[in-house]
Image: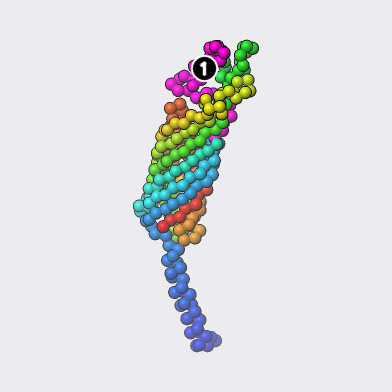
Amino acid sequence: MMLPQTRRTLLAVVAAVALAATPAAAQQAIPETGGRVYGLVGGAFGDGTHVATGAGAGLRLTRHVGLDVELTHLSHGSRGEVAAPRFGGMSVFSGMSVAGAASEDYPLLGGGDDPLFPSMRFEHHGTDVTTFLTKFTVEFPVANGRVFPYLSGGGGVSRVTERASVVVDSIPWIGDSGLFPAYSELGLAFVLGGGVDVTVWRGLGVGVDIRWLRILRSYGALDMAQITTRASYRF
């Protein structure tokens, strides 16, 4: 049988632990409204293969609805040898000529039969895409607010930079020389996706973000699936 003094001591220890745990539990709680910041790193696939990095910040307006702004950069989306970009149905190289010959004498994709003139091809060295997005985010907190599945969608502006060269008989003719180093264009961007954040310590969380990204530009849209890991902090 437990002695009265031992029982009182045990009760005092339990009470002290409970009192100490109450502030700690309060520190773990995440307010239903407030701010959040996050960072992304991963890849994008579809019209080229890219490395994706980004950062964002936003406000949680209610327990479920928030508004975010995000800056993301997709780099090094090389697609090898492709057809030259076209504007209004006309190739950007349609007016070129070499040694006084008309441009129609030069097949842009190689394999020309004329022995007097080398064949030409358009060689793609990569695409960089930078987007600035405004997104609505809808969260569905579960597990006492420690797990945050979410859906998000929105739009914004983008800058697409194409790096390319024209190769004549396996010799780079236009490209690094500065005559055609890159082409850059502003356009619109749209995003739709979702993911999940898991709180690991106080407001700090980790998770995964999966989205579809569409970039509009003057000579054709880019469509990409983006998969990234995400680190976030809620306050």
Image quadrant assignment for residue 23: bottom left
Query: Is disc 1 surrounded by few (<14), some (14 to 19) or many (20+) residues within 10 Å?
Result: few
- Residue 162 visible, this angle: yes
Q: How many marks?
A: 1
Residue farthest along the bottom direction in this orientation = 4
Display coloring: rainbow
Q: Nearer the viewer, residue 94 or 156?
A: 94
Q: Which residue: 53% across, 15% down?
A: 97
Q: Is residue 27 magenta?
A: no
> Where, quadrant-wise, is the N terminus in this rendering?
bottom right
According to the picture, the residue beneath numbered tag 1 turns out to be 96
| Vertical order, 36 against 47 (above or below) | below
Image quadrant assignment for residue 45: top right
| Vertical order, 47 against 114 (above or below) | below
Q: Which residue: 51% across, 20% down?
A: 93
**Amino acid type for the residue under numbered disc 1:** Met
Magenta part of the protein: which range?
Answer: 77-104
Q: Is residue 80 magenta?
A: yes
Q: Which residue: 38% across, 57% down?
A: 32
Q: Which residue: 52% across, 48% down?
A: 229
Residue farthest along the front direction in this orientation = 177
Rendered location of residue 204, percent (x, y): 48, 57
- Residue 228 visible, this angle: no
Q: Nearer the viewer, residue 86 or 12?
A: 86
Q: Is residue 116 left or right of 70 when viewed as pictured?
A: right
* Secondary structure, magenta segment, majority class: loop
Rendered location of residue 222, percent (x, y): 48, 32
Q: Nearer the viewer, residue 181 or 135?
A: 181
| Vertical order, 14 against 150 (above or below) | below
Q: Secondary structure at mark 1?
A: loop
Rendered location of residue 76, percent (x, y): 55, 36
